Structure formats: C-alpha cells, structure tokens
Amino acid sequence: MLNIKDSVAVITGGASGIGFSMAQYWVEKGGKVVLADINPESLKIAKQKLKTNVATIECNVTKEKDCTKLADFAMETFGAINLVVPSAGIINDSLMLNIDRETGKVKSKMSLEQFTSVININLTGVFLTIRECMEKMINHDCEGLICLISSTGSLGTAGQINYSSTKAAVSVMPKVVTAELFRRKMAHKIRCVAIAPGYVRTPILEGMNKKALDYILNKIPINRLIEPEEIASLTGELFRNQALTGDVFFIHGGLRLDSKG
Ligand SMILES: NC(=O)c1ccc[n+]([C@@H]2O[C@H](COP(=O)([O-])OP(=O)(O)OC[C@H]3O[C@@H](n4cnc5c(N)ncnc54)[C@H](O)[C@@H]3O)[C@@H](O)[C@H]2O)c1
C-alpha cells in the first residue's frame, strides 16, 4: 500500500470542484499539492484555504508549454510527482442537430467551435498533462498513480456529443498507458486508472440545462448528487491500493442511463 504522507499530487483544474476537493483531502493526509488552473483568482483563494504544503501555478492545459512548465514547477518545488489528476474540464452542451418538434426539420447545429472547445481542454489537455508529468515520474524514478477523470457521460449522454466523446476517449487511456508501461516493466510503479463520476455537486453543473439535470436527478438511486469529498476519498484509495490499475472506476450513486441518454 502506498502512503499519502509526503507524496506530491499535481492537480489541474485544482482551484475548483473535484480538483480542489482532492487537494484538500491530500493536504489533510499529509501530502503536498501543486494546484494548476487557468483562473488566477480562484487559484489564489484555493491557496489561502489550503494554507500549507501547496504551490500554485497558472496553467492553460491546452497549451503544450504550460503543461511542460507545470511538470518542471512540480519537480523544482517538491522534488517528485506521485499523483497526477488532470481535473481541468468544461462542458459546452447542446444537441448536435436541433430538430424542430413540429416541422421535423433541423433548426440549428452544434458549431465546430463548440465541439472543439471541449475536445481541446478535456482530451488534448489531459494528454499534455499526463505526458509531461509522466516523463518526470519515469526519469526521476517516482512511484504513484495517474488518476484520470472520465464520467458516466462516457456511456453516451444526449446533448453532450463533445463532452461524451472526450470522456469515452479518456476511459481507454488507462489501458493504453498501463500496456505501454508494462512493456518496460514499469506498470507496477506508475499505475493509471480513470474514475467515472455521475453527477457531482460542483460549479460545472451550473452550465447544465436545469430541466435535463432535474430529469437525471430523479434517476439516481441514492437520491442526491455525489459530493466532491466522496470523489476525493475514492482517489485516495486508488492511490493507496497498488492492485488497482488499468481500468475505470464508476462512482455514480447507482445511476443508469437509458436509451434516451
Ligand atoms: N461535476 C460533475 O458532475 C462531474 C462528473 C463527471 C466528471 N466530471 C469531471 O471532473 C472534472 C472537474 O470538474 P468539476 O466538476 O470539478 O468542475 P469545476 O468547473 O468546478 O472545475 C473545473 C476547473 O477547471 C478549470 N479549467 C477550465 N479550463 C481550463 C484550462 N484550459 N486549463 C486549466 N484549467 C482549466 C476551471 O477554471 C475550474 O477551476 C472535469 O474533467 C469534469 O468533466 C465532473
């Protein structure tokens, strides 16, 4: 079992929601945290709240140079990287084709910009973050976990062709990364998993259609949203337990999507 005490977590999107909750959990257990986010104001507030064992860096995960700087910064500040959580993510929902109920004709389409805005952050940003951080972990002989954040959206949510596509792609990454490390006999040392949350009480949900969210809330067997602290606790266990790698771990309160997504 790995110990969180004194180990170093790099968390993107760490100034809010799930990322921030993970940072709180990590520091409470004696770990050190590098928080990266595109929003300097919320980074400042997050740092004040965490108080100790935290370093912050402004970083846009879609920029290759920013991700390289982030990994360098983590090594210079704390001398190791043991947990990587690429939590920076957005939604930008709408139907791919908005079909008029009465005429049966297409009224509007999801723009290419709306599609790629999500791909760039949720998929390319994850690739850049883990590529840069894993390079340091390998070259500096660090032990630990890459914990990606997928979603139940990976199973296919209507109105989220952009978001669902990124989360499905992220779901396959633990298998690819684990296979690549296994080829070099390193898969026991650097493990890779994804968690796939259902609906978690964070600011990202404010961007969701209220009616769509209420519809989903009625389908959650535990009758509530998941708390970000519950996601942090799962991540802690995934880090500690070294038998866990190469797969996706759902945390959704029993939610199942139906054929209407
Ligand atoms: N909240 C949920 O219901 C839920 C469910 C499943 C998966 N997720 C995933 O969890 C992750 C975190 O979501 P959250 O709910 O905490 O959202 P959030 O909005 O609270 O936090 C996201 C953070 O990412 C930052 N960010 C956005 N673009 C960025 C960029 N280009 N570079 C760096 N930082 C950037 C934001 O400033 C923000 O601080 C996302 O990947 C999201 O898809 C969330």
Image: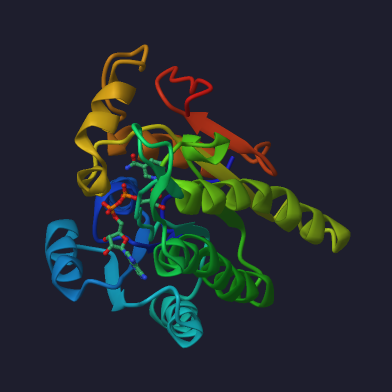
User: Is residue 4 shown above or below 129?
Assistant: above
Residue sitting at 87 percent across and 60 percent down?
183
- Whether residue 9 is visible: no
Q: Position of residue 205 (x, y in %)?
A: 25, 43
> For the point 26% across and 20% down, which residue is it?
224
Residue 85: x, y in percent?
46, 56
As drawn, the residue found furthest toward the front would be: 103
Closer to us: 78 or 129:
129
- The answer to whether 97 is drawn above or below residue 10 in the figure is above
On the image, which quarter does residue 121 sit in?
bottom left
x%, y% of residue 239? 53, 44
Q: If the image is split into quadrants, where does the N terminus sit? A: top right
- Residue 37 left/right relative to 175: left
Residue 142 found in image quarter: bottom right
Kindly identify the residue that appears in the image at 37 percent across and 37 percent down. Answer: 103
Relative depth, front residue between 235 and 98: 98
Q: Is residue 158 left or right of residue 203?
A: right
Judging depth in this view, the residue of 76 and 205 nearest the camera is 205
Colouring scheme, one of rainbow, by chain, secondary structure, one colour: rainbow
Q: Is residue 95 left or right of residue 186?
A: left
Residue drawn at point x = 35 percent, y = 17 percent: 220
Q: Is residue 65 visible?
A: yes
Question: In the rendered view, would you say 143 is above or below 71?
Answer: above
What x and y, as percent, mark residue 24?
26, 49
If the picture is divided into quarters, which one holds ligand 1?
bottom left
